[in-house]
Amino acid sequence: MTEILPERGAVSGPEQPADGGPPRPEGDHGGKAPARERGFAAWWRGDAGEPVRRNSALIVVLLALIAFAAYRRPDVYLDPDRAISNIMTILTQASAVGVLAVGMTFVIIGGGIDLSVGSLVGLASVWCTTVATQEFGMLGILFTAVTVGTIAGLVNGLLIAYGRMVAFIATLAMMVAARGLAAQISNKTTQLVSVEGINGLAESKILGIPLLVLVFLGVVVIAWVLLNRTTFGRRTVAVGGNLEAARLAGINVRRQTLLLYALSGLCCGIAAIILVSLSNAGASTHGEFYELDAIAAAIIGGTALAGGRGTIVGTLLGVLVFAMITNLFILLNLQVEVQNIVKGLIIIGAVLVQQFRIGGLRKRPAAPKAA
């Protein structure tokens, strides 16, 4: 029997129940949500809506921290001028770690880890501030920092992709070696920068926004496009999600891994320039423990340690949460030790949430196939 469908564009009347009862009024779906609502609810509760849920939760946490800070220090957060100045200070201080966290996000999504980013920042800052380098002026310093960071990242990538070393071991060795090389180059002394262009970067503003903050935001935007709108980003997710499947799909896994660590090294060079401009000097101690902050920000932002999952927006929010906590502790004159304890607890909580979430996805029954 052929079902007769109404003509396209015809206006249908009230919904007629299957049991032949009186027609239901408009909006009454017999206890069932319409397909559009069911689709949104399923998307929100499902795996596809997880990044949005996590980012929304991070925004709520960030707003709660701001509200608490306004309650404890109304003289800073409720005064418009001081509040704006304080926010710009927070963003400026978070710029270096934020750039590192962006590079770390790519590496972790690709199934790796980079413990050497802090030491590479120190190495790049020392190398780009030597007397010989400063003779080439501002462009010489910028080029040297970026080149040193990228080459060091390439070395990491070669050891991991072609030397078949475990990422943890290779980057741990680079962390120790780079810090030692930085100390040897600088002779464990701080190298002052006499180039006015570099010293003026930290004080430069565009439309009232510090230039370093704009550099950080520019890196975030480029990274978002690279991860979400390019083949490179899709290959990164594929390699981190399932290495063997990516290889069978024709992806050059070794080359992709090499490029990911080179990208992380490039971010180290940019972060070194930020720190040099803020301190007007290069030092082998620059970037100490920054690798922990970068990894923590990426994890808080939803980047899975197992690889294959992560967002740039989530990493940005993770950086802002940690920066806000640091600023709050400074304003309240609390000890650094307590701040580190709080950060550690936050990292543990984020990892536990990831573990329970992955376990829930594994136990979730498969959706029935359509007939």
Image (spheres, grey):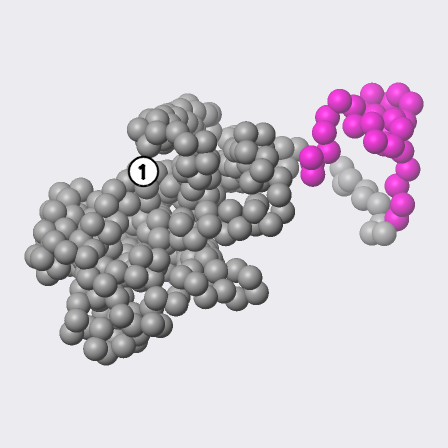
Which residue is denoted by mark 1 in the rendering? 305
Q: Main secondary structure of the magenta part?
A: loop
* Residue at point 19%, 57% (across, down): 190
> Was residue 22 drawn as part of the magenta stretch in this picture?
yes
Q: Amino acid at mark 1?
A: Leu
Q: From which residue to which does the magenta span run?
A: 10-37
Residue at the extreme bottom: 136
Residue 100, x across and y down, in percent: 33, 51
User: In the picture, which quadrant includes the C terminus?
Assistant: top right
| Residue 71 visible in the shown view | yes
In percent of width and height, residue 314 lies at 46, 43
- For residue 269, above or below residue 160: below
| Mark 1 element type | loop
* Left or right of residue 152: residue 274: right
Locate residue 215, reporting x and y percent.
43, 62
Quadrant where the N terminus sits is top right
Taking depth in this image into account, of 284 and 238 the one nearest to the observer is: 284
Question: How far across and down, in percent of the image, does residue 22 sit?
Answer: 91, 23
Numbered marks: total: 1
Residue at the image position 10 percent from the left and 51 percent from the top: 180
Q: Considering only vertical position in the picture, is 350 above or below 76?
A: above
| Residue that appears at 33% across and 68% down | 198
